[in-house]
Amino acid sequence: CTLDSEVALRVGGDFFFDPQPGDSPVNLVLIAGGVGINPLFSILLHIADLHGYQEGKGNGHKLGTVKLYYSAKNTSELLFKKNILGLMNTFPGKITCCFHVTQQRSQICEELQPHVTGK
């Protein structure tokens, strides 16, 4: 987003992301904390499936980018982190993630270091 961009925001509740062929592309910002990643990870997997299908055969979907911000106490509590890193590697520039840890006491593994911020 840039200054003065229009955004839609949903917090909790019943939500989903199901773009249809021919819809204008949208850029998503997904924000999760702790186990709140579960529904957003499902959305991320759906988007990855659409990107993969689009690249393989073309399905009429016009997809934007996805930026996931995911916070937990430490890296061991970041659920699905290896899957998320895999999606970022498979779809560079299309799916990105910034992990944030608030109480990390140990060294952050090399694989996660470029994607982790914290106190």
Image (cartoon, helix red, strand yellow):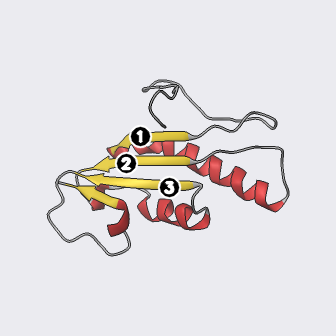
Q: Upstream in the sequence, badge 2 or badge 3?
A: 2
Q: Secondary structure at mark 3?
A: strand
Q: Upstream in the sequence, badge 1 or badge 2?
A: 1
Residue 18 percent coordinates (x, y)? 68, 35
Q: Secondary structure at mark 2?
A: strand
Q: Upstream in the sequence, badge 3 or badge 1?
A: 1
CB of mark 2 within 8 Å of CB of mark 3?
A: no
CB of mark 1 within 8 Å of CB of mark 2?
A: yes
Residue count near mark 2 (Cα–Cα under 10 Å), binned few <14, some 14–19, many ≥20: many
**Residue type pointed to by label 3:** Thr
The residue under label 2 is 70
Q: Nearer the viewer, residue 113 or 36?
A: 113
Q: Kindly report the distance in space between the C-alpha atoms of the residues bearing marks 1 and 2.
A: 6 Å
**Residue type pointed to by label 1:** Ile
Q: Secondary structure at mark 1?
A: strand
Mark 3 or 1, which is nearer the eye? 3
- Residue lying furthest bottom: 110
The residue under label 1 is 31
Q: Residue at x 57, y 43 (%)?
A: 43
Image-quadrant location for residue 98 = bottom left
**Residue type pointed to by label 2:** Tyr
In the visual, does 19 lie left or right of 45?
Answer: right
The residue under label 3 is 96
Q: Residue at x 29, y 60 (%)?
A: 75
Q: Kindly report the distance in space between the C-alpha atoms of the residues bearing marks 2 and 3.
A: 11 Å
Residue count near mark 1 (Cα–Cα under 10 Å), binned few <14, some 14–19, many ≥20: some
Residue 3 percent coordinates (x, y)? 44, 32
Numbered disc total: 3
In the visual, does 105 lie left or right of 24?
Answer: left
